[in-house]
């Protein structure tokens, strides 16, 4: 049994992708177990592995951690990506909550009935509520990173959010020159660059098969 | 600055701390867990209620709301938004976040669970009438089969007074709040959970919490039609 964290989730992005990003950014190798059948999921529940009967599950440092934010906070703190004092931590928390809200809209998109899907709202929120904030933060302090002149969880999550929205609307950063530079800069950090290359554990955008698998695994008898 | 003097003693100049100021609608919503945590920590706070669309627009225009949303808490020179960020900051500041990273991780997991449960209850009044009954049933089911059994077991397994690290924390405050909210939905919801019943009794008696539970505190009542009408 290796000491590497072990991620249990569907074979796709969903709520686990932010965890993959953060571990990768921190240069932490991890293993993955993919949920493919309802039986696997039921067994995890029966074994008492899932605190609230839900995945993501990350086994790390002897803990079976659930709840994405709890997992991300733990990794960020452990890997020195959470600022150097409570106030920097507060800013990182605010910024990641913003990007999490934006990404949350995209995560749930394929699971929303087609007639209720609102791509225009996602783009509107990205370009009028979220991206302007980060553009301004970076412009005002002129530093390379969002908080405390130091690479943090906030930077990783912002890059993840930018790339996710660009997949939906490739020109979305056209009015955000500072974010364009940020995107390039963070993408070039060696651990991130590696994660962005083919063959990494980064997952592709959800397709019909992914959606079908999730529904099948979680179905109630 | 406030001067305090007593006969026969030196004058003391007390610097009055600036109280945190909460900006939200005059109701529970997403701000209530913040009110609970500040109260539990014995921190006095002020409130400014968003009552009209114009109130909200003014806050937005003043650049006071990072993502154009409330809750917003003006604390320690920061205009903080995003409920979880605010709660984490307060917990950290007031020694309610455990004593190390692992305790913090447990507290985070537990509060995420109670947050999910309270989120379901919070949004019930906003559901269309035809969905309400189904969602109400789901809340009761989730509370009694997914969430409460977890906390019951945690308390039973370690036999301590508090959820994490044998010390009062944010997780205990949040759980009590969730229990009371669930009981408002179904008064006997705790009947299968003796540990939680004892926990409820115990935590309710902590002086700061006891004070918050009394009439006249800043605790808000459940959502009613008037509150609903205010939400933009």
Image (tube, rainbow, N blue to C red):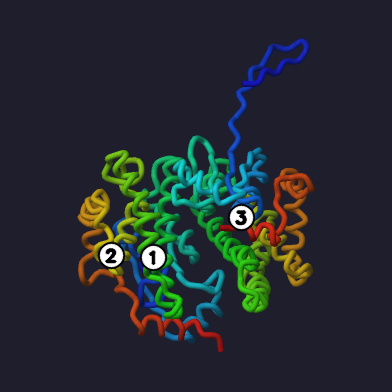
Percent coordinates x, y for residue B77 in the rendering = 49, 35
- The label nearer to you, 3 versus 1, is 1
Question: What residue appears at the point 73 percent right and 12 percent down from the top-left corner?
Answer: B9
Residue B94 vs residue A136, the one in the foreground: A136
Vertical side of A193 occupied by B16: above or below: above
Q: Which residue is mark 1?
A: A122
As drawn, the residue found furthest toward the front would be: B54
Vertical side of B145 occupied by B50: above or below: above
Mark 1: few, some, or many residues within 10 Å (few <14, many ≥20)? many
Q: Is residue A67 among the parts visible in the rendering? A: yes
Q: Is residue B223 left or right of residue A91?
A: right
Which mark identifies residue B171? 3
Q: Quadrant of the C terminus of chain B?
A: bottom right
Q: Which residue is mark 2?
A: A166
Question: What residue appears at the point 78 percent right and 67 percent down from the top-left corner?
Answer: B187
- State which chain disc 1 sits on: A
Badge 3 and badge 1 in a common chain: no
Percent coordinates x, y for residue A72 in the rendering = 42, 58
Q: Quadrant of residue A187?
A: bottom left
The kind of secondary structure element at disc 2 is helix
- State which chain disc 3 sits on: B
- The label nearer to you, 2 versus 1, is 1
Q: Is residue B165 among the parts visible in the rendering? A: no
Residue B166 vs residue A90, the one in the foreground: A90
Residue B52 vs residue A196, the one in the foreground: B52
As drawn, the residue found furthest toward the bottom would be: A221
């Amino acid at each position: 049994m290796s000491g590497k964290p072990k991620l249990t989730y569907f074979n796709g992005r969903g709520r686990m992708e932010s965890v993959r990003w953060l571990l990768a950014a921190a240069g932490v190798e991890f293993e993955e177990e993919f949920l493919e059948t309802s039986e696997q999921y039921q067994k995890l529940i029966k074994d008492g592995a899932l605190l609230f009967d839900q995945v993501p599950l990350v086994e790390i440092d002897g803990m079976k951690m659930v709840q994405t934010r709890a997992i991300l906070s733990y990794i960020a703190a452990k890997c020195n990506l959470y600022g150097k004092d409570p106030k920097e931590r507060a800013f990182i928390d605010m910024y990641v909550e913003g990007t999490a809200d934006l990404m949350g809209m995209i995560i749930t998109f394929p699971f929303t009935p087609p007639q209720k899907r609102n791509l225009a709202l996602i783009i509107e929120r990205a370009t009028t509520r979220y991206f302007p904030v980060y553009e301004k933060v970076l412009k005002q302090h002129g530093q390379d990173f969002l908080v405390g002149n130091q690479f943090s969880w906030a930077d990783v999550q912002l890059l993840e959010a930018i790339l996710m929205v660009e997949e939906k609307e490739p020109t979305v950063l056209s009015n955000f020159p500072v974010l364009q530079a940020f995107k390039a800069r963070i993408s070039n950090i060696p651990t991130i660059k590696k994660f962005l290359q083919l063959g990494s554990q980064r997952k592709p955008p959800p397709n019909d098969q992914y959606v079908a698998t999730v529904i099948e695994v979680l179905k109630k008898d | 600055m406030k001067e305090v003097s007593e006969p026969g003693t030196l004058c003391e100049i007390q610097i009055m701390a600036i109280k945190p100021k909460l900006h939200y609608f005059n109701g529970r919503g997403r701000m209530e867990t913040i009110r609970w945590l500040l109260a539990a920590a014995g921190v006095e706070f002020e409130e400014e209620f968003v009552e009209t669309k114009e109130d909200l627009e003014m806050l937005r225009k003043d650049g006071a709301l990072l993502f154009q949303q409330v809750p917003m808490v003006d604390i320690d020179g920061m205009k903080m938004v995003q409920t979880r960020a605010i709660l984490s900051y307060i917990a950290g500041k007031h020694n309610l976040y455990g004593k190390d990273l692992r305790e913090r991780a447990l507290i985070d997991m537990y509060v995420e669970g109670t947050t999910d449960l309270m989120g379901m209850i919070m949004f019930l009044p906003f559901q269309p009438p035809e969905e309400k009954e189904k969602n109400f049933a789901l809340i009761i089911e989730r509370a009694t089969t997914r969430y409460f059994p977890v906390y019951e077991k945690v308390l039973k397994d370690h036999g301590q007074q508090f959820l994490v690290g044998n010390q009062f924390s944010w997780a205990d405050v949040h759980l009590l709040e969730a229990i009371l909210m669930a009981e408002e939905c179904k008064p006997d919801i705790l009947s299968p959970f003796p540990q939680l019943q004892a926990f409820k009794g115990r935590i309710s008696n902590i002086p700061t919490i006891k004070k918050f539970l009394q009439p006249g505190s800043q605790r808000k009542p459940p959502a009613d039609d008037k509150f609903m009408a205010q939400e933009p």
